Amino acid sequence: QKEVEQDPGPLSVPEGAIVSLNCTYSNSAFQYFMWYRQYSRKGPELLMYTYSSGNKEDGRFTAQVDKSSKYISLFIRDSQPSDSATYLCAMSPYGQNFVFGPGTRLSVLP
Amino acid sequence: ETGVTQTPRHLVMGMTNKKSLKCEQHLGHNAMYWYKQSAKKPLELMFVYSLEERVENNSVPSRFSPECPNSSHLFLHLHTLQPEDSALYLCASSQDRAGLDSGANVLTFGAGSRLTVL
């Protein structure tokens, strides 16, 4: 079993839709969770990070962690064409040496 | 310039060539990293430098040789590569190598160097 699994997509949604991006993991020691966004021909940039379980909201983005199910989600409300990118989840037990998922490619169609 | 800058952005090389990738960060960070990104695969951590000392080397073949002359510059020297080494090589930096009680270690990535080995 891979340490972090993520559906590679591509995921295509119409503008304005609510998008749900997910990662599952196998290592119960993970407690730091990050979401990175990577535009085409660019490096990943940090979108959100959370520690342990719970929700965190930042504008149109909500990160959710369910440690009991080993499952994390990123929700994007009112999605825009500018949200079209690859979204990478990353996680770590101690806040360093993050393990990345392969990324989900998202297309938001105008 | 700000952030993390990588050069060249694109590189095509034969299997017998020697080339180098360069990374420069203008953020005052103390840790620098090389990652390999292949299509539909997770980012693979290759090397980590903290305060110019290599602290991680994740079983990377010796045809990849990193160099960190100071905390702002990082190089990846390439020699006798294989076609399967074709990938996007990303450099990143972070403030430090945050440990157990120091909170998340936020990486700032460069745009990457796209390497094609013929």
Image (tube, rainbow, N blue to C red):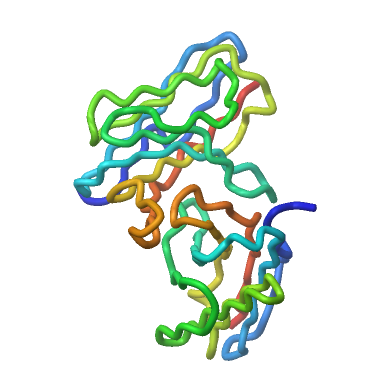
Please identify the quarter of the rendering in which residue A5 is found. bottom right
- How many marks on residues? 0
Quarter of the image for the C terminus of chain A: give it.
Answer: bottom right
Tell me: B76 left or right of A19.
left
Q: Is residue B6 above or below residue A20?
A: above
Q: Is residue A67 above or below residue B28?
A: below
Please identify the quarter of the rendering in which residue A45 is found. bottom left
Residue at position x 28%, y 50% in the image? B95
Tell me: B90 left or right of B3.
right
Residue at position x 57%, y 90% in the image? A16
Tell me: B27 left or right of A56.
left
Q: Residue furthest top?
A: B16
Residue at position x 40%, y 55% in the image? B100
Q: Is residue A95 above or below residue B83?
A: below
Residue B32 in percent (x, y) is at 35, 39
Camera-nearest residue between B87 and A50: A50
Q: Residue furthest right?
A: A1
Residue A90 in percent (x, y) is at 55, 59
Camera-nearest residue between B11 and B90: B90
Residue A58 in percent (x, y) is at 41, 83
Q: Is residue A36 above or below residue B93?
A: below
Please identify the quarter of the rendering in which residue B75 is found. top left
Residue B21 in percent (x, y) is at 41, 27
Residue at position x 57%, y 52% in the image? A99
